[in-house]
Amino acid sequence: MTYYHRGNRLKRGLTDFRVEAESENTDRIVRAFPASLFEPPTDCGDPSELPVFVVGMPRSGTTLVEQVMASHPQVHGAGELNDLWRCLHGIGAWLPPGTGLPEAVGEVDPDAWRELGAAYVKQVRRYDADAVRIVDKLPFNYTLIGIIRLMLPKARVIHCLRDPRDTTVSCYLTAFQNDRGFTFDLAELGTTYRQYWRLMEHWRAVLPGGLFEIRYEDLVTNLETEARRLIAHLGLEWSDECLDFHANPRLVSTASMTQVRQPVYGSSVGRWRRYEPHIGELLTALGELERYGFTRPT
């Protein structure tokens, strides 16, 4: 941990990340997406059921969940895509002059959501011409769940959860290819996790039933039960190939590329305890774990 601390301090000095901005952005999104925005009748978005979005914090099991789904013969796992963000670059043409997102989301013409949703479907269809479902596994799409609902009302959104201590410690110990800058300081990491959770609580409140949630701990303990639940949510018939996800030769380029080549294992559950004497700032920043559905060990 001496060397992890040293390396993370060096990396932190190279980023302009502001933890205050996480809270500010969460406030803006929560204000811009009240429940009334999603109340029927709604007549917007592309009706395709092709897209599946896997969201959550990095290191929460998103790659494993995608790999299980992508082992189904009718599902294509496309990895961490930027296509959704690219499609949204054109939304300025549909906004009143001088406005922007998220504040002006309620002023977007329904035709815009249909056009943007269709553009996204066209973009991802190029990854697989025959798949019934295509998975976009960019974890940070959790900030766009409200927009996903407006653009693609029939898309599945799968939220991956894992013990916040294991999630954040794994973030701290991982060198990501792309990083927003919040993983290099233990206090900032814990604070950012809290903001992520606050936003997810908001989506649950304004989109009841709109999220399918799966816990990493349940998946590695009861693989078949959870995998069957997952595939049923996609509206597909069960395939035993999902249990052999580790034999799937598809390209995986995330930090979990080696883990998903192995049969399911539970040795990473509770891994944070090995580092407990060194992560006091993180545990303090996370605060009471009951808010996340976990309790501290007695």
Image: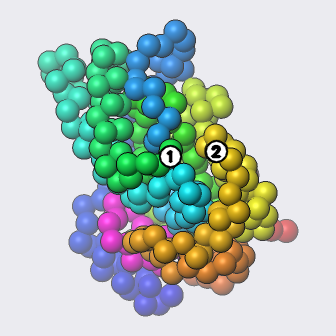
Relative image position of residue 270 (x, y in whole percent): 70, 74
Relative image position of residue 254 (x, y in whole percent): 42, 70
For the magenta stretch, what is the residue range?
Answer: 170-183
The residue lying at 30 percent from left, 76 percent from top is 11
Residue found at the very far front of the displayed protein: 130
Q: Are marks 2 and 1 in contact (CB under 8 Å)?
A: yes
* Number of marks present in the image shown: 2
The numbered disc on residue 236 is: 2
Please say if 243 is above or below 91: below
Could you say which quadrant of the image residue 17 lies in?
Answer: bottom left
Q: Earlier in the sequence, mark 2 or mark 1?
A: 1
Split into 4 quadrants, where in the image is the C terminus?
bottom right
The numbered disc on residue 250 is: none
Say which amino acid is labelled 2.
Leu
Local crowd size for mark 2, using a 10 Å CA cut-off: few (<14), some (14–19), many (≥20): some
Relative image position of residue 205 (x, y in whole percent): 61, 29
Determine whether, in the image, residue 277 is placed left or right of residue 48: right
Local crowd size for mark 1, using a 10 Å CA cut-off: few (<14), some (14–19), many (≥20): many
State the residue position of label 1.
133
